[in-house]
Amino acid sequence: MRTFRLRNALSATAIALSALVTGLTATQALADADIKLVIENHKFTPAEIRVPAGQKIRIVIDNRDATPEEFESATLRAEKIIPGKSKGMVIVGPLKPGKYPFFGEFNEATAQGVLIAE
Ligand SMILES: [Cu+2]
């Protein structure tokens, strides 16, 4: 009985430890700030991205449209042409807290978004 209880206690500890490790991994992923942005029908999804301030942010842009798009932002100092049906990547930051609008230069009427560093 005593051994059984000990074993249960140990497996509970193992579960707690693995939860802790998972928690750390999630925090680390946030620190890496790898953002995925989709372009579809000349719109960005998500149109609003929240990222931690003071970190380098890697934005992977998946252009699912058949036509090229240019991710552009003056405040982020980023400009990247992504051909149709392909992916592109921009690295921005570290950013001060604030709002950083971006747009698709080839479809500016619909392709609008904002990155919020906080
Ligand atoms: Cu441009």
Image (cartoon, rainbow, N blue to C red):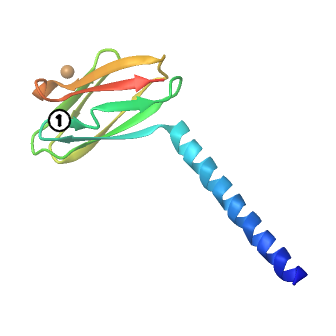
Image-quadrant location for residue 78: top left
For the residue pair 1 and 58, the one nearer the viewer reads as 1
Residue at 37 percent of width and 18 percent of height: 99
Q: Residue at x 29, y 37 (%)?
A: 46
Q: Position of residue 104 (x, y in %)?
A: 18, 28
Question: Image point 63% across, 48% down: which residue?
Answer: 24
Q: Quadrant of the N terminus?
A: bottom right
Q: Which residue is mark 1?
A: 43
Q: Residue at x 44, y 32 (%)?
A: 57
In the rendered image, residue 72, in percent from the top left (x then y), is placed at 25, 24
Q: Is residue 104 above or below residue 19?
A: above
Residue at the far bottom: name it: 1
Q: In the image, is 86 to the left or to the right of 77?
A: left
Is residue 59 visible in the rendered structure shown here? yes
Q: Position of residue 85 (x, y in %)?
A: 17, 48
Q: Can residue 77 be seen in this snapshot? A: no
The answer to whether 35 is drawn above or below residue 77 in the figure is below
